[in-house]
Amino acid sequence: MKSSEIRQAFLDFFASKGHEIVASSPLVPGNDPTLLFTNAGMVQFKDCFLGNDVRSYTRAASSQRCVRAGGKHNDLENVGYTARHHTFFEMLGNFSFGDYFKEDAISYAWEFLTSKDWLNLPVEKLMVTVYAEDDEAFDIWNKKMGIPEDKIVRIGDNKGARYASDNFWQMGDTGPCGPCTEIFYDHGEHIWGGPPGTPEEDGDRFIEIWNNVFMQFERKADGEMLPLPKPSVDTGMGLERISAIMQGVHSNYEIDIFQALLKAAGELTGCKDTENKSLRVIADHIRSTSFLIVDGVLPSNEGRGYVLRRIIRRAVRHGHMLGASAGFFNKLVPALCEQMGEAYPELVNLSEHVQKVLRIEEEQFAKTLDKGMAILNDAIADMSGDTIPGETAFKLYDTYGFPLDLTADVARERDLKVDEDGFNTAMEKQRETARAAGNFSADYGKGLELDGETGFLGYESLENTGTVK
Ligand code: ATP
Ligand code: MG
Ligand code: MG
Ligand code: MG
C-alpha cells in the first residue's frame, strides 16, 4: 500500500465508525500561544476535550501535519539517528469528545490494524503497553481482545531511558491528561532493540506505532487534577511508521515518500547512498521547513522563525558536507510537491513562495558557512579534550550564523561535545557589553529580507513567527 492509500484507509475506516473527517490544521496552532508548533492531532481539538468548544460531532478523525522540533516534544536531534523520528510527520488520529472510551478505542485500533478488510497485520508481531495502574485497559486487551499477558507491558514512571514514555500523557504542564496504551510492532530479531519496558527499548526493533490516550483529567496550574466533564479519547499513529510496516521495510526512510525525496536529494547533492545520514536529514528537513513556510513561518532570530532557520541551516550544512553546491536545498520543493501536493494543495499553491524563502535563507547562510566550518575544524584540531569551547561556539553563532545545535550536530558526528555553559556565558557577556554601549542590535543576521515583496503573511492567528521587513 502506498502511504496515500494508508492515509485514506485510516480515514475511511473511522468514517465507517461514525467519525467526522476533519482537515489538518496549520502547524502554527491558532488556539494555543503557549505551544510552539502543532505536535499532535489533538491540538486543534483541545477545547473540545476541555468542554469549551461544542461541535456538531462527538467523534472525529484526521491526518494532521505535525512538527516536533523545539518545544516540549523535540525530535530534531533524533533525525538521522533513529529509523522512526522526523521533524515533520503526519499523525493519523481518531478522537472521542465525551463519546466512546477505552473499550471502543482499543477495539477500533485493533480492528483497523489486524482485520483482513483493513491492514491485516499479523497479530504475533504486535505488542502493547498500558499505564501501570490502568487495570481496565489491561483487562480489555487481555480478556476482550485476547492478547496474552506476556504481550501486555505495564509501564509506570519514566525509567530514564532516552525515549521512554511513562504512559501517562499530558499536553503540557497544565491541560488535559490521562493514561495511555501504546501499540508496538516487532521488526524482527535482526534489528537491535528490546520490547518496551526493557533497557533496550530505545533500539529500533520494537517500534511504537499507535498511542491511545484516555483523557480523564485536566491538570490545573497548582497541580490539582480535576476529572474532565466527560472522559475522552485522543489517539495518534505516525503515517510514516505504519507505512514502513505495510511496505515491508524497517526504516521510515525506506517508504515511498522518502525514497522519492532521497532520490531527488541524491541528484542534487551527488550522494547516491539512500542510507546516508546527511541525505536522510536533508529529506526530513525539506518537509518540515517547507510546511512551516506554507503555514506562515519565516526564518528569523527568535521564536518559531528561529526554529525554522535552525532546521534550514542544518540541512544546508549537511548538503555542504556531501559536496552539494550552494542553493541545492530549495530545489527539492518540486519533488516534495509531487509526493505531498495531492494531500496538501496549499503546498502546491505556495510552492514558489516556499522555494524563494528557502533560497534566500540558503544564500545568506552560504556566505558564512565555509568560513565558519574552517574555523570550527581548526578549533577542533587544536583541542586537547573532547569539548568544543563555548567561546568558539559563540563566535560561530555570532559571526557566522551557526545556531548552537548546528555546532553540536557537527560535534556529535565526531564524538565531541560543546561547552554549552561557556556558550551561554559568552552570549551573556556580549549582551552586557551591548547594553552598556546602548547598542541593542548586536545580533548576527536579520529577519529575512524578501526584496521588498510583501510575501505571504500566513494565517491571521500568526504571532511571533518571524519578521518580514
Ligand atoms: P517515540 O516514543 O517513538 O518517540 P512518542 O511516544 O513520542 O514516540 P507520541 O507522542 O505517542 O509519540 O505520538 C503518537 C504517534 O506519532 C507515535 O506512536 C508515532 O507513531 C508517531 N510519532 C511520534 N513522534 C514522531 C516523530 N518524531 N516522527 C514520526 N512519527 C512520530
Ligand atoms: Mg517521542
Ligand atoms: Mg513513546
Ligand atoms: Mg507515544
Image (spheres, grey):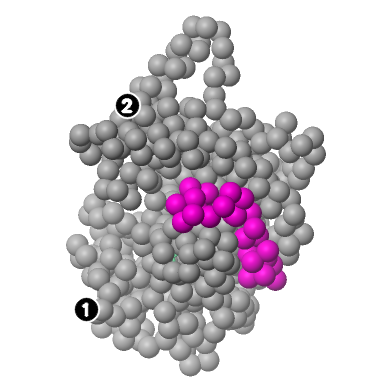
What residue sits 69% from the left and 42% below the top? 461
Provide the secondary structure element on which disc 1 rests.
helix
What residue sits 49% from the left and 40% below the top? 370
Q: Which residue is mark 2?
A: 422
Q: Position of residue 126 (x, y in %)?
A: 34, 80
What residue sits 57% from the left and 61% below the top? 268
Q: Are marks 1 and 2 in contact (CB under 8 Å)?
A: no
Task: Identify residue type, mark 2.
Answer: Gly
Among numbered discs 1 and 2, the one appearing first in the sequence? 1
Decide if residue 208 is on the left or right side of residue 132: right
Can you tell which mark lies on residue 150?
1
Examine the image and state in which quarter residue 256 appears.
Answer: bottom right
Q: Quadrant of the C terminus?
A: top right
> Mark 2 Cα within 10 Å, few/some/many (few <14, many 20+)?
some
Q: Position of residue 17 (x, y in %)?
A: 59, 80
Start-end of magenta stretch: 315-343
Can you tell which mark lies on residue 188?
none
Label 1 and label 2: CA atoms lie apart by 49 Å
